[in-house]
Image: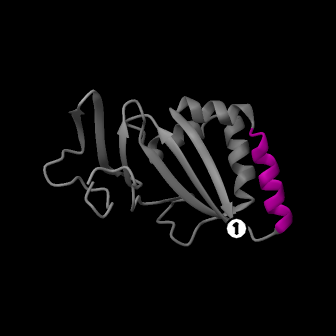
């Protein structure tokens, strides 16, 4: 990744490159997916991290219900997300803005893989329900619902 976090490899660094430093194996990953840029510098076996945002409908009761539903997501939803190779999914809220991060298996492509996840009937039902609480973020591009965010800083990235 370049020093400004634009998702491009640094000069001389291939999009995926393994380096050995002492006893540790470091994997540098930077690139793009059809839905946007992602970046990750990690020690094996950590996976690439993705970040997305969306807004909620500005209604206190609806936001409270959204929070309640996410205290116990439906088992089929959790299973479907894990089946995509996702882990460490977290959603934060500030006012009406939601910010989500998750780690994904190498090769994960949100545009392709979320379509497969959404084919399961119970997941479709959950996603339809969630859309009644949500609205696209102003920065969402094209057909994005959750807007893909660009990594602009990584504290542990090499100099």
* Residue 149 or residue 2, whichever sits in front: 2
Q: Is residue 104 left or right of residue 128?
A: left
- Give 15 or 21, whichever is nearer the viewer: 21
Q: At 75% from the left edge and 36% from the top edge, which residue is drawn?
A: 74
Where residue 111 sits in the image (x, y, percent)?
A: 46, 48
- Under tag 1, what secondary structure? loop
Is 102 on the left-hand or right-hand side of 155? right
Q: Which residues are magenta?
A: 60-73
Magenta stretch mostly in which secondary structure? Answer: helix
27 or 133: nearer the eye? 27
Counting from the top left corner in percent of width and height, residue 147 is at 52, 61
Looking at the rendering, in which quadrant would you find the C terminus? bottom left
* Quarter of the figure with residue 89: top right
Check disc 1: other Cα within 10 Å, few if <14, some if 14-19, many if 20+: some
What is the residue that sits farthest to the right in this orientation?
61
What residue is rendered at 73% in x and 43% in y? 125
Colour option used? one colour
14 displayed left or right of 42 = left
Where is residue 37 drawn, in percent x and y?
37, 56
Where is the N terminus found, in terms of image quarters?
A: bottom left
Q: Position of residue 105 (x, y in %)?
A: 44, 34
Spot the residue most to the left.
12
Q: Which residue corresponds to mark 1? A: 96
The residue shown at (27%, 27%) is 23
Query: In the orientation shown, which residue stands out farthest toward the front?
Result: 22
> Magenta span has 69?
yes
In the picture as drawn, the residue positioned furthest to the top comes out as 23
- The residue at the point 15 percent across, 54 percent down is 11
| 62 sits to left or right of 145 | right
- 146 above or below 22? below
């Amino acid at each position: 990744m370049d020093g400004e976090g634009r998702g491009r490899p640094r000069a001389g660094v291939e999009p995926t490159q393994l380096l050995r430093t002492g006893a540790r194996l470091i994997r540098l990953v930077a690139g793009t997916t059809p839905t946007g840029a992602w970046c990750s510098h990690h020690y094996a076996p950590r996976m690439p991290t993705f970040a997305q945002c969306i807004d909620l409908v500005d209604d206190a009761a609806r936001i409270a219900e959204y929070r309640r539903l996410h205290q116990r997501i439906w088992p089929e939803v959790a299973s479907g997300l894990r089946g995509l190779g996702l882990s460490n999914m977290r959603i934060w809220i500030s006012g009406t803005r939601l910010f989500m991060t998750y780690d994904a298996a190498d090769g994960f492509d949100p545009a392709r893989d979320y379509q497969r996840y959404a084919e399961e009937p119970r997941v479709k039902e959950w996603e339809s329900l969630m859309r009644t609480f949500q609205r696209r973020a102003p920065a969402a591009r094209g057909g994005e619902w959750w807007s893909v965010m660009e990594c602009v800083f990584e504290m542990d990235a090499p100099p």
